[in-house]
Amino acid sequence: MSWATGAAYKDGRIMPVPEATIPVTEWGYRRSDVTYDVVSVWGGAFFRLADHISRFRASMQTFRLTPRETDEDIRSILHELVRRTGLREAYVAMDCLRNRPPPGTRLHPANATCTLLAFAVPYVWLMPRETIERGVHLIISSTPRIPEICLDPRAKNFHWADMTRSLFEAEEKGADNPVLLDLDGNVTEGPGFNVFAVTNGVVATPDRGVLEGITRLSVIELCGKLDIPCEIRPVPADELRQADEIFISSTAGGVMGVTRLDRRVLGNDRPGPLTERMREAYWRFRKEGWHADPVTYDLAA
Amino acid sequence: MSWATGAAYKDGRIMPVPEATIPVTEWGYRRSDVTYDVVSVWGGAFFRLADHISRFRASMQTFRLTPRETDEDIRSILHELVRRTGLREAYVAMDCLRNRPPPGTRLHPANATCTLLAFAVPYVWLMPRETIERGVHLIISSTPRIPEICLDPRAKNFHWADMTRSLFEAEEKGADNPVLLDLDGNVTEGPGFNVFAVTNGVVATPDRGVLEGITRLSVIELCGKLDIPCEIRPVPADELRQADEIFISSTAGGVMGVTRLDRRVLGNDRPGPLTERMREAYWRFRKEGWHADPVTYDLAA
């Protein structure tokens, strides 16, 4: 069989992705008691793999999930998965989920072991390439993001009901994607991406209520390299509504320009100049090997 | 092989429970884009099966999940699962989860089909029988419940991170279980149960921010039968703290008395008289066939 469609890891074994399954009784599914991370491979190299693994470990600690694999094990597993597929552009996910406590023990999460699952598949774009080219159409969702006090958004999780509901609202309004506000009316994030507002040449992105995205971090670093001022602070919805430019960032797509927000058309309905500069810089730096961790495809080499 | 440990249903087929698995890539797991319900079988009969199926259907509609099975199909499947196991006391779960959109379509939930999964296993008690006998020890969690405006708690879901975190807090404080408040400081619910406060012979239970439990409904109906006044309205945390008695309700355990809340010992550290009356009535009515839907174990009969 061909591994080109993907490879997965579970319980010490590499297997085809469809064989990587979760019993219906496990709490990783049944209580969404799970954390995850996603890293990309582009041009045959992981991007910021160490950053992703250390964020993944921090998320596991937040949720008190402890797999038997060490960080070094995880790094080896992810490299082996990509090597096995031969993919030069890949989307690589790692999950740590809680099992059901064994029979005869009290039904408490402290009594359960955890399982590491990982898989590498061909690179996934958050949105179709044509959508990214023409510019993303966003709405501000009427559903607020689950608040930080209930669930720490820095620990990556599958609690996506607010996102899913917002995705349906975006669809109904003819948009591509939603952005969610917090309960105070500040911008948070969208399903799988961070948000940036550009006003008078200054980039602003929310400091709280959001996943601290690795691509977001890369944008913040690129702002430094390109001498673009970048502010990490609360971003009120109105600031986003009145921004000169908006762009979003994601492991699944990098930097993507936004051309519509609700009924407003930004610029000339094309991604703005600072956005394009950022997008170009992001892919150029990656091509040049910035934060790259190359995959060794031919073990005999 | 023996079916006595359980039987599961997926894609038109009955199988042993360990074979009922979910691919790691499905959104029912990966986005917790799933709803569920749980019904009990006691003395060979389902309890309020029609109520559970109609709540399950309402939950599916809230989340826009559509399996191919009708309500009548679901009823037949659940009966067949219990018949297959031969269990006279069973815990019967039904899930409807969203699959990943097929390759080549946009990654939007509207493009995905849904799968019905169900399983019957030996009856599960929310807490060990000894804990229920001595009375449950609760804490008020410092983590608030995910608010209604983000996620409708009437649509049963696996967004349990707030519950899981609270379970760890309860464990650390030497208690059995947590109860969570809403952002305004009113009582909501605990992991898998509704909460009732008894003050001067009057029962009160929250009207919002909670799952409308079927056992909760049964308690409300039993209050009517037993001439006990019952109020369904916001219950401030202080009312619970100062209550004469507290009890909880769940499909996994029925009516259970609470004897401690944080540092307070209620009554004489034994479930209170109204609580005991309610618990006795609950099991007596069930034994007498109240809302019962008997399982036909021997199809030849």
Image (tube, coloured by chain):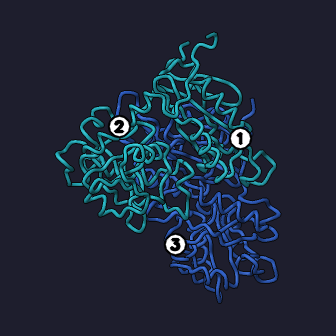
Chain colours: A blue, B cyan
Callout 1: helix, strand or loop?
loop
Above or below A194: residue A92: above
Label 2 lies in what chain?
A: B
Above or below B149: residue A14: above
Callout 2: helix, strand or loop?
loop
Q: Residue A143 location in percent, x, y?
A: 60, 66
In percent of the image, x 46 and y 54: which residue is there? A59
Q: Nearer the viewer, mark 3 or mark 2?
A: 2
In the image, what residue type sits under mark 2?
Answer: Met
Q: CA distance from mark 3 to mark 2?
A: 35 Å
Count numbered badges in the picture: 3
Q: Which residue extends farthest left?
A: B268
The residue to which callout 3 is attached is A183
In percent of the image, x 71 and y 54: which residue is there? A43
Q: Residue B121 location in percent, x, y?
A: 50, 26
Callout 3: helix, strand or loop?
loop
Above or below B200: residue B269: above
The residue to which callout 1 is attached is B67
Residue in front for this viewpoint, A263 or B69: B69
Q: Residue A224 location in percent, x, y?
A: 57, 78
